[in-house]
Amino acid sequence: MGQDVASHLEGLLQADYLTYWDYIHLETLLSLQNPRTAYPDELIFITYHQSTELYFKLILHEISQIAQHAALTARFFTERMQRINRYFDILERSYSVMVDGMEKEQFLKFRMALLPSSGFQSVQFREIEIVSTDFVNLLSGDFPTDFTPTLSLESLYPFLYWKQGATELATQQKTLTLRQFESHYSDRLIRLATEYRRCNLWQRFLTLQSQNEPTDELIQQLREYDHRLNVRWKSMHLRSAMRYLHQNPDDIKATGGTNWQKYLPPREQKRIFYPDLWSEAERQEWGKMSKIDGWMVENG
């Protein structure tokens, strides 16, 4: 009784209509900004980082669709890469909120209440890196010389390049920031790297190439993505760090600071997801190029 179509329609008429605030959980969303200090600009800081993480979620969502597509085509891949580049374009343009949108004096005060937390601990950004390229492209220069593609990811994990950015200059020991991150996320990242070893963006691209799919437009999107993430995005972070944190290196050693001067500059890292898509000259100029594929790059 009561299971016929008319009864269901009557129930819908009697039910409350969905509202905007319920659909996006507006009250919950606006309750998530909880500054630790009374400095007004801390609200800017936390809100910006939360919105950035939401865009990271969208980027991972698009990459997952590419990785898991059972009948992947160049068109589908290209359209998803266009979405991803659009998200990063929004993030790049909005980063002036961080660089120019806070008072330095306030930032240097409220940041002390946030230690040892750091944007370095964004696991979603690390996941984006891992699912975008072969693992070897994320290793620092001191990984084993007897490297082979069959080495376990667990054995390569200690050589991830970004760990250098959370190493104390004076002692070469891991900072508390890094130790916390590894304790919480290492297993998760190794599992993800294992899952995407054969289906990261580069491997999916190679599959399409082997099937003689037309990839010219896709190559353009992958090049843009590579440069956006590894040069432009990190250059914006460098500008922010230079404005708020620049000190004499000796002072950083004395206070146990991390070596962000070596970790952030693209020209120091030369981190490239898709080296085969760039010429030798382009790779040599990585991090110093002012223009690529028709759009300008500001390296500061």
Image (cartoon, helix red, strand yellow):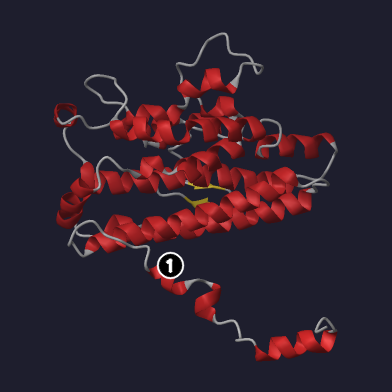
Residue lying at 64% horizontally and 55% vertically, measured from the top left: 82
**In the displayed structure, does residue 83 sit left or right of residue 248?**
right
Q: x, y percentage for residue 60?
A: 59, 49
Residue lying at 56% horizontally and 28% vertically, measured from the top left: 137
Q: x, y percentage for residue 2?
A: 80, 84
Quadrant occupied by the N terminus: bottom right
Residue at the front extreme, as displayed: 1
The amino acid at mark 1 is: Leu
Q: Is residue 75 above or below residue 251?
A: below
Residue lying at 58% horizontally and 47% vertically, measured from the top left: 224
Residue at the top extreme, as displayed: 146
Q: x, y percentage for residue 56?
A: 51, 52
Number of dots carrying numbers? 1
Q: Is residue 2 above or below residue 102?
A: below
Residue 174 placement: quadrant: top left
Query: Do we see residue 161 in this rendering?
Result: yes
How packed mark 1 is, by other alpha carbons closer than 10 Å (few <14, some 14-19, many 20 or more), is few
Residue lying at 57% horizontally and 35% vertically, measured from the top left: 273
Q: x, y percentage for residue 262?
A: 33, 30
Q: Is residue 195 above or below residue 108?
A: above
**In the displayed structure, does residue 256 sit left or right of residue 179?**
left
**In the displayed structure, does residue 255 sit left or right of residue 25?**
left
Report which residue position mark 1 lands on: 29
Query: Do we see residue 101 in this rendering?
Result: no
Nearest the eye: 79 or 288: 79
Could you tell me which secondary element the residue under label 1 belongs to? Answer: helix
Nearest the eye: 166 or 28: 28
